[in-house]
Amino acid sequence: MNYIKIILACVAIVLGLLGIPSAQEWQGLKPLHSTCEDVKRILRVTTCEPPDNIYDLGNERVRIIFSKSPCQKASQKWCNVPPGTVMSIERFLRKRIPLADFRLDEKKYKKIFTDFTDEVIYVSEEEGMSFSVINEEVYIIEYLPAPKDKHLLCPKLSKP
């Protein structure tokens, strides 16, 4: 039994080193839970304000969208989180990763065909992730809010 735990821990470490994501979280950053301060600490950057919310990390560029205000304000109607909270994370990979490496459960992902030749986007609201793929290789990974965070969504505005 302990061998299984050790093997699973090793697999998790290897996947982390390869940059293969776990659902809804990347490098300890999680949409609707992480803050600008978390981003600064984890990515070792100094700012979270646009346009500086695109970070060049060598093997990839990362774009992080931050909340500007809670949904009580007219400028934001998406989630009721404090300003500076991570809303989504997009990783633009410089070296593509074969889609097969991610072992996606295709029952959880919706396939969206785009106007670009051979591009398919796999989106899972349940997993809180999307993968942009060309020729069976992932080039963008996006981390989105999870369904378990529905309580953070702003109430819909009533129509007059």
Image (tube, helix red, strand yellow):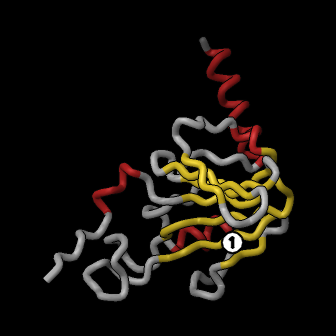
In the image, residue 68 above or below residue 23: below
- Residue 26 appears in the picture as rendered: no
Residue 59 x/y as whole percent: 84, 63
Residue 114 location, quadrant: bottom right
Picture residue at 52% right of the left edge, 40% below the top: 108
Viewed as shown, does residue 112 lie left or right of 92?
left
Mark 1, other Cα within 10 Å: few <14 / some 14–19 / many ≥20 = few
Where is the C terminus found, in terms of image quarters?
bottom left
**SS under mark 1:** loop
Residue 102 vertical position relative to residue 134 in the rendered view, above or below: above
Considering depth in this image, is 155 or 55 the residue closer to the camera?
155
> Residue 41, image x and y in percent?
61, 69
Residue at figure coordinates x 53%, y 35% from the top left: 107
Q: Residue at x 70, y 41 (%)?
A: 102
Farthest top residue in view:
1
Q: Who's the residue at 51% across and 59% down the image?
A: 144
Tell me residue 133's x, y (percent).
73, 54
Question: As shown in the figure, which amino acid type bears the numbered disc 1?
Answer: Arg
The residue where tag 1 is placed is: 44
x%, y% of residue 104? 64, 38
Quarter of the picture containing the N terminus is top right
